[in-house]
Image (cartoon, rainbow, N blue to C red):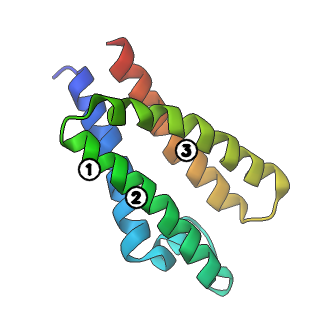
Amino acid sequence: MRWTRERSEQAMLGIGVGVGIGAMVSPEALQRMFGVPRSQVTAAGALGWRLFAARNLYLGARALRGDRQAVAAYGHLQVIDQAVFWSALSSGRIPRRTSVLAILTSGAVVALDRHRRSA
């Protein structure tokens, strides 16, 4: 079975919407999954993750309804997210595992978007 442009788009949106749902419903659980120790999970952190979720869910809803600009925005936003995640890694202010997992998750979306655009 060949990996198609459509599959890359579906996977990209699946990751974005999945992370968005997790961050909206239970940001504390998502933070722990991304390596933030329970002792460092804060209300401010949960708010930040919910803001991140709102962006992902808004774009995801538009993209799933066929808005091609929303689909295109996913990849562009991941490039910005990459800068934030790499900055977090270099600053050492959040757990290394958290930064690395965020970089890898975002990187998967960038790779899927690149394939989606080039196929």
Residue assigned mark 3: 104
Q: Residue at x 50, y 79 (%)?
A: 28
**What is the quadrant of residue 6 in the picture?**
top left
Q: Is residue 6 left or right of residue 44?
A: left
The Cα–Cα distance between marks 2 and 1, rounded to whole angstroms, is: 13 Å
Residue assigned mark 1: 61
Does 40 sit above or below residue 77?
below
Look at the image and tell me in which quarter the N terminus lies: top left
User: Residue 83, percent across and down?
Assistant: 69, 40
Q: Residue at x 41, y 28 (%)?
A: 113
Look at the image and tell me in which quarter the C terminus lies: top left
Q: Residue at x 66, y 55 (%)?
A: 99
The three-letter amino acid code for the residue at tag 2 is Val
Which of the marked residues, 2 or 1, is nearer the chain's N terminus?
Answer: 2
The three-letter amino acid code for the residue at tag 1 is Ala
The Cα–Cα distance between marks 3 and 2, rounded to whole angstroms, is: 13 Å
Callouts 2 and 1 close, C-beta under 8 Å: no
The three-letter amino acid code for the residue at tag 3 is Leu
Q: Is residue 33 left or right of residue 94?
A: left
In depth, the one of 119 and 80 nearer the eye is 80
Image disc number at residue 19: 2
Q: Nearer the viewer, mark 2 or mark 1?
A: 1
Q: Is residue 115 left or right of residue 45?
A: left
User: Residue 16, percent across and down?
Assistant: 38, 49
User: Residue 59, percent across and down?
Assistant: 35, 46
The Cα–Cα distance between marks 1 and 3, rounded to whole angstroms, is: 23 Å
In depth, the one of 52 and 1 nearer the eye is 52
